Structures are given as structure tokens and as C-alpha cells.
């Protein structure tokens, strides 16, 4: 009656190719149970909130946006298959809700050769909402066989015994049938913003939420990059982690300075937006301790990355550095996981060298009393920018990153640790899959 | 016989001369941005006015405690010249409060406040000439430092150490307002997760799998 044919692999759910679910296992293929069974045999994928660890806070899944690839050459010969998405409270619990069910019929006509037919079909992006009252904490994607309509025995080019999926890196060697999760975005909160019908989580909204948990309000987050930067990966489920770490992690994408001068308000300031002050280094109240060094200055970098086949590759990028002249000073860095091609790896190297081709300034300046052009030294604040007057070659604007006040001696010590913050900001945004949305 | 004279420029010197003593003694004191003491040594005052004055100048900068005497403005000459040391008499409006009560500056040995561009007021370390054991902890729980109407620091007590060196001092460490965010290292939340690695294929056991579909 029901027979999946000579294929002993049954129905399969494969994740996106790049994630290497099966291919990274010692046994490249793991069969699902009861592969020769009757209709109703299924395979599942799970996403569980906090890996199933009980949580006191009433967090739950509110929305899942997913896009699937359905098909496979066996789908051309057999039908029907059914895709279902369930919501559960726990992994082993009953299905509480089924927001989406989709019947996968045979693609193409019997006269079409399945090997040449575009066998994989992408579904449109689905937005599946889960009501808060159900407290859904686990999402199940299930594929099951409903019925088989056998048209013709598919002649395999490669014997089944030799058909492995170890080297799958594209659609050249597709599985017989299955569903590929192309993209999936799970939201732990109901989104507040939408762009083009797609839920959007702004980084600034996440920062506000992190601070609101301890009673802080925010100001200054409606400017610049904070208005448009959204992220696709803001999931903190590892302990121990406190809100300060989460705040720094999210703010690293913006590169904003933030200050808690008041009891309940945190003020954010875009980089480079601080007031500009002048310091005359010939003033007797100013003690200068600036120094340039080339410890972090490079004119070349070797970028290692992993290509789509999982092999480690590297590219060499050079950039002329005025600080180093003809001296070649290089190091090796690792590109983020999202970098798969040599071209993008070169871009990473160029970004990195852009931040590391100049000399770095360190040390500090000590001010005493009221300094003309700067003001009262005790009112100095981090985030200000300072122009040094009277020093050749030091006319660039330096950002004050730290201030040490000695009120009883009417003295302030300003620090100018210049970090390659642009590259760090790009790295943080890359890790969070951040993108800019239209307003 | 006592004779008093005053020399004005360039520094203000008050001198008191006492006659009839075996060794005449002239003491000059100037108090302001620095401390000057002068001693005149001579056989007799009447032997002439040739005398030698030795000025001992203090090397340390002044503290804000004690008596302050304001110096007259020094001769500036050209307009660009500014005094080397700040005139501490201008340092008004500085308020240091421990748990809401104003702290006497004479008790404070040192105070350092660290501000960063990631949070603003980060740490304040204050050393006081006092054995803090005699102070109840409620009196030390918070530090507020304001200057000219602006808050330099506000934070809560995080550490207290006693130094039993030459002088008994207590060092208090305060943390800024954002320290509240680090109180519980159990922050876990999900705004959005698009990482496909978090999808699992672990099949629950057939007994535990209750499917109602």
C-alpha cells in the first residue's frame, strides 16, 4: 500500500545547507525512525526557548517567521507530504496550537523528468503568531507522509549504497525529499515595528528594554544610527549574564557613549557628537602625557575564513600606512562565520586595516583649575572631543574616553585611549546580523 | 620693643620683630597658594639692617581644610600669563555627602572619581582620616559629590578597607548608578533568534511524545 520505494531514507527534514546538520556528523546520514512505515511517519525539527530550561519569567514565543524549501526528486514521484508547525509548552508536551499546515503536492507533471525539473520550491515568508495565553515555549516543524502517488520508479544514477550527503554544499546532490529551513526567525516578544510586512527589532528598542528592567529611562536613542539599525540575532540565553553585559553587547553595534548622570535616566550620545574643546598645551595648568605608538599599526593582514565547503582559506590584504612608510607589518585575523568568499574576506581585511593603519594615541592629559578654552577641569566629561593647540602634528580631534577627577586638588586627568571602534562595531553588527531599515 | 613692618610686592609678607632678645628673630608667614616661612638671623637688631632671610617653601599643594588666606592678584604683565597653580579659593560649590550628610573636608585624605564613556560615573575611591569601625554602615552607604550644581558622582558603597599605617585611614569604594544592572547575573531574554543552529532534531522518546494532531 504505502511504500517509500527502494529508498531507505524515508522523509527527511534538512536544515539550511550552510548549517551542516547532517553533514557534520560522523555518520553523514541519520535515518528517521520507522522509515518503511505507513503514512503518518514523520520527521521533526524543534526550537525550544532557553533549551528547555525552566524560566521564572513568563517568557514565551510570540511569532515565528520562516521560509522553507520544499521538494526533492522523490516529491516529483510521490505525493503527498504535509508540513505542519505546532506550538507546545514543553518539548515532550502536547501540541497546543497549529498555526500553519501546508500540503506538499507533486511538483510538475509525470512527463517531466524530475532531474531537470526545478524540484525545490521556496515558500513565501510565513508569519506564525502564537497567542500569549498559551505560553508557547517550543515550536515544532513537522513533515509527514500522507499519501503516495507512484508514477515511475526513479532510476538512480548513483547506487543507494554509495549515495552520501557528506559533501553537500549546494543543490547538486539533493536529498530525496524533505524540507529545508531557509530562514527562520523566532521572536520572544511581540514585535512593535514592522517594515514591509516583516517584523523588525531595532537595537535601540532592545537597549531600552534592557534598561527598563532596572527602572532606567533612556534619552538620545532617537538619533543617527540608532534610528534605523535592526538586528536579527538578539537572543541571550546563556548564564551568567547580567544586564550590563547585554547592554554593552547591544550598544557595541551602535558605538554610542552612554552616561548615567541622573538616578533613573541613561543618556546616549552618538559617536563624535560630544562638544569640542580646546586645550592649549603651552598653558602652565596643562601637563601633557600623550604618546604615539605603532603597537596596533599594520600595513598588511592575513584574513582566515571558512568557505562554503567548510575548508579554511585565507587572503592577504595590504594597505599603505603613512605611519609605517614602507615597513610591512602584518598579522593574522579570523573572519566571522558569515564570511564565506574571498571577496568578502578581502573586504574584512580592508575594514580592519582602515582602523589599524594609523598610529594610536594613549596616555593622558592633566588639567588643573580653570583652563582657558576648556573651562573648569572638574566639569570635564567623557565623550567630549579635544583639539590640542600648540602641538605640531597633534591637531586632530581626540575623544575623551575617561576622566579621573580629583576634586580636592581641583585636578582632572583625561584619557584618550583610541580604539579601533569602527571595526569592532562592524563585527558586533555582523554577529547580530544587523541591517538598516527604511524609516 | 616690638616693631612690625609689611612688605607687599611681589608677595605679601607680614613680619614681626621682637627686640631685646639674644638672637633677634623675624618670622614671616604667607598663606595662600603655598606656604612660606622666613627666619631672620642676626646678632642684634641695632647692628644694622643687614640680615639674612631664609624662605622655606612648602612642596605640597594645599589642602582645602584649614584656614585660607587669599593672596592679592599677582602681577600679570602681559595678558596671556596665568598663574601656575589654581586658586583654590575659587573652588566653591563642591559638596561631598555621605548618605546625605555633608562630610567635613578635613576628614578626607583623598578622593578620586573615575568617569568613563561607558556609563559615566564608574568608581569613586575616598580615603578618610577616620576609623570607619565607629561609623555605622548606614552613614557610609552612598556618596554624592556635586560641583557647581552638576553631579560629579553618585553611587553606593561597594568596599571598605582600613589602613593601619602611620595614620589610621579608611578607604571607601563606591560604584556608580549603573551598578544596579549587574546585581543579578541571570539575564536571559529572546528578542529575535535567526540562528538555525538552535533548531534541534532530538526526537523525544516515543512514550513521552504525546501528539494530538
Image: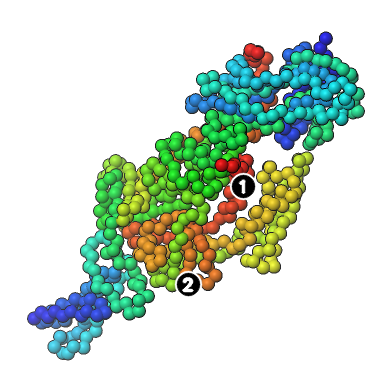
Q: Callout 2: residue from which chain?
A: A
Residue A88 rendering spot, x and y as whole percentages: 59, 19
- For residue A165, side relative to residue B130 (left or right): right
Picture residue at 41% right of the left edge, 37% below the top: A215
User: Residue A427: which numbered mark, if any?
Assistant: 1
Which badge, 1 or 2, is on the more N-terminal residue?
2
**Quadrant of the rendered image containing residue A33:** top right
Residue A318 rendering spot, x and y as whole percentages: 71, 59
Circle 2: is it few (<14), some (14-19), or many (20+) Cα within 10 Å? few
Q: Evaluate if marks 1 and 2 touch, with contact meaning CB atoms under 8 Å apart.
A: no
Asked if residue B21 is positioned above or below residue A254 in the image, the reply reads below
- For residue A428, side relative to residue B109 (left or right): right
In the image shown, does A74 or A223 lie closer to the viewer? A223
Which residue matches tag 2?
A390
Residue B8 in sight from this viewpoint? yes
- For residue A193, side relative to residue A168 (left or right): left
Amino acid at each position: 500500500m504505502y511504500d517509500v520505494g527502494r529508498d531507505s531514507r524515508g522523509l527527511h527534514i534538512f536544515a539550511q545547507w550552510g548549517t551542516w546538520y547532517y553533514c557534520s556528523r560522523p555518520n553523514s546520514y541519520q535515518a528517521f525512525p520507522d522509515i518503511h512505515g505507513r503514512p503518518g511517519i514523520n520527521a521533526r525539527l524543534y526550537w525550544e526557548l532557553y533549551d528547555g530550561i525552566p524560566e521564572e519569567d513568563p517568557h514565551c514565543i510570540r511569532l515565528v517567521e520562516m521560509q522553507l524549501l520544499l521538494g526533492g526528486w522523490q516529491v516529483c514521484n510521490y505525493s503527498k507530504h504535509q508540513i505542519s508547525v505546532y506550538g507546545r509548552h514543553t518539548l515532550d508536551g502536547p501540541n497546543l496550537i497549529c498555526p500553519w499546515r501546508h500540503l506538499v503536492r507533486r511538483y510538475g507533471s509525470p512527463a517531466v523528468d524530475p532531474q531537470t525539473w526545478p524540484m525545490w520550491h521556496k515558500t513565501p515568508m510565513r508569519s506564525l503568531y502564537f497567542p500569549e495565553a498559551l505560553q508557547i515555549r517550543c515550536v515544532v516543524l513537522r513533515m509527514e507522509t500522507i499519501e503516495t502517488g507512484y508514477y515511475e520508479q526513479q532510476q538512480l544514477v548513483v547506487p543507494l549504497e554509495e549515495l552520501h550527503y557528506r559533501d553537500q554544499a549546494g543543490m547538486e546532490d539533493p536529498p530525496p525529499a524533505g524540507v529545508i529551513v531557509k530562514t527562520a526567525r523566532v521572536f520572544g516578544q511581540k514585535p512593535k515595528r514592522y517594515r514591509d510586512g516583516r517584523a523588525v527589532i531595532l537595537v535601540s528598542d532592545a537597549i531600552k528594554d534592557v534598561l527598563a528592567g532596572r527602572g532606567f529611562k533612556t534619552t538620545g536613542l532617537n538619533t543617527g544610527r540608532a534610528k534605523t539599525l535592526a538586528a536579527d540575532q538578539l537572543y541571550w540565553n546563556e548564564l551568567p549574564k547580567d544586564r550590563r553585559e547585554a547592554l554593552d553587547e547591544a550598544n557595541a553595534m551602535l558605538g554610542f557613549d552612554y552616561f548615567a548622570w541622573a538616578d533613573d535616566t541613561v543618556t546616549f550620545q552618538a559617536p563624535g557628537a560630544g562638544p569640542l574643546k580646546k586645550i592649549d598645551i603651552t598653558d602652565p595648568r596643562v601637563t601633557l602625557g600623550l604618546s604615539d605608538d605603532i603597537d596596533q599599526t599594520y600595513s598588511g593582514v592575513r584574513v582566515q575564513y571558512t568557505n562554503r565547503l567548510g575548508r579554511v582559506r585565507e587572503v592577504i590584504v595590504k594597505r599603505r600606512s603613512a605611519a609605517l612608510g614602507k615597513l610591512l607589518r602584518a598579522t593574522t585575523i579570523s573572519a566571522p562565520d558569515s564570511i564565506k568568499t574571498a571577496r568578502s574576506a578581502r573586504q574584512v581585511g580592508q575594514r580592519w586595516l582602515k582602523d589599524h593603519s594609523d598610529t594610536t594615541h594613549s596616555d593622558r592629559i592633566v588639567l588643573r583649575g580653570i583652563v582657558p578654552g576648556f573651562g573648569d577641569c572638574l566639569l570635564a566629561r567623557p565623550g567630549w572631543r579635544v583639539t590640542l593647540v600648540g602641538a605640531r602634528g597633534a591637531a586632530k580631534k581626540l575623544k575623551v574616553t575617561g576622566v579621573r577627577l580629583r576634586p580636592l586638588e581641583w585636578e582632572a586627568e583625561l584619557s584618550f585611549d583610541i580604539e579601533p571602534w569602527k571595526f569592532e562595531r562592524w563585527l558586533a553588527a555582523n554577529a547580530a546580523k544587523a541591517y538598516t531599515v527604511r524609516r | 620693643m616690638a616693631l612690625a613692618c609689611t612688605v607687599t610686592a611681589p608677595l605679601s609678607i607680614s613680619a614681626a620683630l621682637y627686640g631685646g632678645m639674644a638672637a633677634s628673630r623675624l618670622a614671616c608667614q604667607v598663606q595662600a597658594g603655598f606656604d612660606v616661612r622666613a627666619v631672620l638671623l642676626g646678632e642684634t637688631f641695632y647692628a644694622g639692617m643687614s640680615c639674612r632671610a631664609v624662605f622655606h617653601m612648602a612642596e605640597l599643594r594645599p589642602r582645602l581644610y584649614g584656614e585660607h588666606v587669599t593672596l592679592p592678584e599677582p602681577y600679570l604683565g602681559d595678558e596671556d600669563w596665568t598663574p601656575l597653580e589654581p586658586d583654590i579659593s575659587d573652588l566653591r560649590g563642591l559638596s561631598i555627602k555621605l548618605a546625605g550628610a555633608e562630610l567635613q573636608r578635613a576628614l578626607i585624605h583623598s578622593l578620586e572619581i573615575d568617569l568613563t564613556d561607558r556609563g559615566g560615573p564608574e568608581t569613586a575611591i575616598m580615603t578618610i582620616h577616620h576609623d570607619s569601625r565607629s561609623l555605622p554602615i548606614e552613614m557610609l552607604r552612598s556618596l554624592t559629590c556635586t560641583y557647581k550644581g552638576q553631579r560629579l558622582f553618585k553611587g553606593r558603597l561597594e568596599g571598605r578597607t582600613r589602613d593601619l599605617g602611620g595614620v589610621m585611614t579608611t578607604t571607601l569604594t563606591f560604584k556608580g548608578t549603573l551598578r544596579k544592572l549587574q546585581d543579578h547575573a541571570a539575564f536571559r531574554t529572546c528578542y529575535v533568534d535567526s540562528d538555525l543552529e538552535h533548531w534541534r532534531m532530538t526526537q523525544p522518546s516515543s512514550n513521552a511524545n504525546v501528539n494530538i494532531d
